[in-house]
Amino acid sequence: MAELVGPRLYSCCNCRNHVSLHDDVVSKAFQGRHGRAFLFSHAMNIVVGPKEDRNLTTGLHTVADISCADCQEVLGWKYERAYEVSQKYKGRKVHI
Ligand SMILES: [Zn+2]
């Protein structure tokens, strides 16, 4: 999970590694495992794990867990592919 640390910057909640920019927020209306989550068009200083198919509340998606490159804390996941047409916009986006 990431948190807003400045007016335009999100960081790892564990080690403060900068992982995303406010300008890259696509949507703030998402729920994550630990509460509120954000959808980013781009993230940095992260490690992307292996892809897997996962059944989410919005349908079947191919996702990959993403972790902080510094402390390995799992921050969220990246949408590699959405099967539902209405969810296609999430493709390649990062959910933190
Ligand atoms: Zn970290």
Image: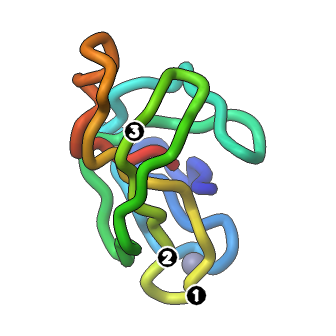
Q: Amino acid at mark 2?
A: Cys
Compared with 13, 70 (above or below) is below
Compared with 73, 42 (above or below) is above
Is disc 1 placed on a helix, strand or loop? loop
Compared with 24, 13 (above or below) is below
- Establish whether ligand 1 lies closer than 8 Å to the Cβ of label 1: yes
Badge 1 crowding class, 10 Å Cα cut-off, few under 14, some 14 to 19, many 20 or more, is few
**In front here: 1 or 5?**
1
Residue identified by numbered label 2 = 68
Q: Residue furthest top?
A: 86
Report x, y in % for residue 68: 49, 76
Mark 2 or mark 3, which has the lower sequence index?
3
**Label 1 to label 3, Cα distance in Å?**
26 Å
Report x, y in % for residue 71: 58, 87
Residue identified by numbered label 1 = 71
Image disc number at residue 19 = none
- Indicate which label's residue lies in the foreground, 1 or 3: 3
Report x, y in % for residue 20: 37, 55
Q: Can residue 46 be seen in this snapshot?
A: no
Q: Are marks 2 and 1 in contact (CB under 8 Å)?
A: yes
- Establish whether ligand 1 lies closer than 8 Å to the Cβ of label 2: yes
- Indicate which label's residue lies in the foreground, 2 or 3: 3
Q: Amino acid at mark 1?
A: Cys
**In front here: 56 or 28?**
56
Report x, y in % for residue 95: 46, 44
Quadrant location, ligand no. 1:
bottom right
